Structures are given as C-alpha cells and as structure tokens.
Amino acid sequence: MNPWTKNKVGDRVRIKRKDIFHLKQRFKNGDVFGRIVNIDGAYIMVKPMWCKWEIELYDNEIEKA
C-alpha cells in the first residue's frame, strides 16, 4: 500500500488477509472485496461484500480496489 494514499470511510478495498478462508470459497477467483465502515487509529473496520458483519483489519491487510 502506498503510504501517500490514505484510506477513507466508504472506499472499496480488497482484503488480503489469508485466514478468512470461508469468504474466499464464496468467490470464484478468491478475491474478497469490501467497504471501509470505520477507521479507529490503526484499526480499520471493513464490511465484506455480501456479509452482515464487519471485520477489524490493519492497513497492511487491505489494498484499494
């Protein structure tokens, strides 16, 4: 992730975290996308597409789509 491009609430991001295998099975190419819901310091709350819940991620676990 380029440190000069800041993440903002509402941005569409690709989730790079590897331990969410149950989401990767839903999508054919394995890419999981979501929207940033809240940013609290180093924690970024992302709501994956087609899910009702949110996941707490760090900046290095996502990239802009």
Image: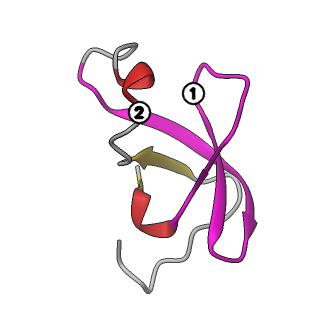
Seen from the viewer's position, the closer of residues 19 and 36 is 19
Point 48% across, 49% down: residue: 13
Point 64% across, 22% down: residue: 51
Residue denoted by label 1: 49
Tell me where the magenta segment starts and ends, as one range: 29-58
Which residue of the protein is positioned furthest toward the front in this rendering? Answer: 19
Horizontal relation, residue 43 to residue 30: left or right: right
Which residue of the protein is positioned furthest toward the bottom in this rendering? Answer: 4
Does the magenta run of residues contain 52?
A: yes
Q: Helix, strand or loop at disc 1?
A: loop
Is there a contact, CB below 8 Å, between mark 2 and mark 1?
Answer: yes
Considering only vertical position in the picture, is 12 above or below 6? above
What mark, if any, has residue 32 been given in the picture?
2
What mark, if any, has residue 13 been given in the picture?
none
Q: Helix, strand or loop at disc 2?
A: strand
| Residue 26 % position (x, y) | 40, 13
Point 57% across, 27% down: residue: 49
